[in-house]
Amino acid sequence: AQSVTQPDIHITVSEGASLELRCNYSYGATPYLFWYVQSPGQGLQLLLKYFSGDTLVQGIKGFEAEFKRSQSSFNLRKPSVHWSDAAEYFCAVGVYNFNKFYFGSGTKLNVKP
Amino acid sequence: EAQVTQNPRYLITVTGKKLTVTCSQNMNHEYMSWYRQDPGLGLRQIYYSMNVEVTDKGDVPEGYKVSRKEKRNFPLILESPSPNQTSLYFCASSSLPTLTERGEQFFGPGTRLTVL
């Protein structure tokens, strides 16, 4: 069965520090991979996506993610976190011709001043 | 402004009282989908639709119905709500995926439903 695992429920980093959020997926074929961000009381906003090509993808707000097929991972990174990055982050996979989606349980990011 | 709208934004109801949550998009998208968000579980897909009169089950369709009679609208129907359907619901829309490209899903603001 398809699944997405985000092993870190909460992460706290200091402003200006680097960030890495982990995501592992389970799917037999190459999935379409996404990272979304949800600010409190808001809907979801797409940060970046990957299906093929360069395994390092750039997104909005200075985020990037790297697809590693051997590890079934799609980790999100940012070199220097800003206080406005505090939010909940969701990894997702699109399967079955990209019509069905599975989301991870989310990682809440806190940013210390 | 391109957007996905949902109504109502907040709803408190009682067990067994039928309700409908509306979803409308103004981007002429073929694909629409409903999700529920619960703490610790992330978002789970309820139903999706690839076009008018074409709907299919997501991961958690039990207790829900949908219809797609017009391209812009995709209402979510709870015929007999139960307390375990208390959740935050999101509607989303996008262009239809191709074999190699999957356009961005645009999400509505969410509907917080409480079933007593």
Image: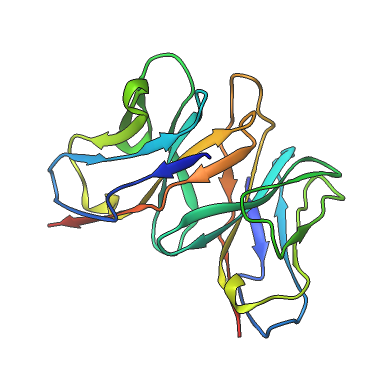
Quarter of the image with the C terminus of chain B is bottom right
Q: Which residue lies at the image location 60% right of the left edge and 78% below the top edge?
A: B83
Residue B57 lies, in percent from the top left, at: 71, 48
Residue B75, quarter of the rendered image: bottom right
- B56 to the left or right of B101: right
Residue situated furthest front in the rendering: A1
Residue B113 shows in the view: no
Residue A5, quarter of the rendered image: top left
On screen, residue A56 above or below B90: above
On screen, residue B73 above or below A65: below
Residue B8, quarter of the rendered image: bottom right
- B89 to the left or right of B38: right
Residue B10 lies, in percent from the top left, at: 59, 75
- In the foreground, B28 or A109: A109
Residue situated furthest top in the rendering: A53
- In the foreground, A110 or A23: A23
- A47 to the left or right of B62: left
Colour style of the rendered protein structure: rainbow
Residue B31 shows in the view: yes
Q: Which residue lies at the image location 46% right of the left edge and 32% below the top edge?
A: A33
Q: Which residue lies at the image location 78% right of the left edge and 52% below the top edge?
A: B73
Residue B21 lies, in percent from the top left, at: 71, 66
Q: Which residue lies at the image location 55% right of the left edge and 53% below the top edge?
A: B44
On screen, residue A56 above or below B81: above
On screen, residue A98 above or below B43: above
Figure disc tally: 0
